[in-house]
Amino acid sequence: MAEKILSVFIDESGDFGPYDFHAPFYLIAMVLHNQDINISKNIDNLESHLSNIGYKQHAIHTGPLIRRESVYANDLMEERKRLFNALFNFTRKLDFHYVCAKIRKDECPDVITLTAKISKAIAGILKDY
């Protein structure tokens, strides 16, 4: 049986602070990509497109892009829409999976419980894939 390599890209949203009704969850999103599926051409096309619209060697960060923060603070809405659409079109053409673990912070009386729930959620997802 040939060995398969799965890339996992993980990002989180939330904090380990106390429960706040404005942010009741701690989220862990994972993008899972089977390395047997070559996406080099897709990446090259995205990088070329980004360069053509003035973002040479640029990694798109959607949170700051949406909130007009950081490197996007002075960008017009149309420029930010172009970046968002470039990322959307890039991802819709790819064969990958994504999952999101959602931990309710009101069920975690302390950081140890939250860490345990996060670890269990990540392990369960990776086991499934």
Image (cartoon, rainbow, N blue to C red):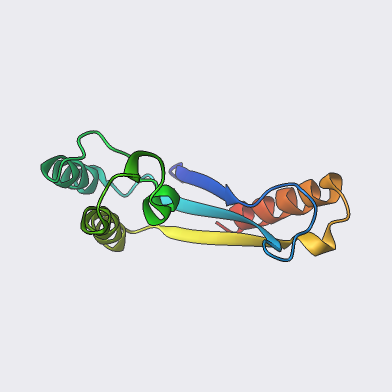
Residue 68 percent across, percent down from the top left: 38, 51
Name the residue located 72 percent from the left edge and 51 percent from the top edge.
118
Name the residue located 29 percent from the left edge and 57 percent from the top edge.
84
Say left or right for 80 vs 11: left
| In the foreground, 56 or 95 | 56
- Figure label count: 0
| In the foreground, 113 or 56 | 56
Residue 27 percent across, percent down from the top left: 62, 57
Say left or right for 120 vs 127: right
Quadrant for residue 91, please give it. bottom left
Residue occupying the far right of the picture: 109
Quadrant for residue 44, please give it. top left
Is 114 situated above or below 5?
below
Quadrant for residue 52, please give it. top left
Name the residue located 39 percent from the left edge and 46 percent from the top edge.
61
Residue occupying the far front of the picture: 74
Is 56 situated above or below 26?
above
Residue occupying the far top of the picture: 57
| In the foreground, 128 or 100 | 100
Residue 12 percent across, percent down from the top left: 58, 49
Residue 88 percent across, percent down from the top left: 29, 60
Name the residue located 54 percent from the left edge and 55 percent from the top edge.
29
Is 100 situated above or below 54?
below
Say left or right for 117 vs 14: right
| In the foreground, 45 or 126 | 45
Query: Which quarter of the rendered picture does the C terminus lie within?
Result: bottom right
Say left or right for 32 vs 52: right
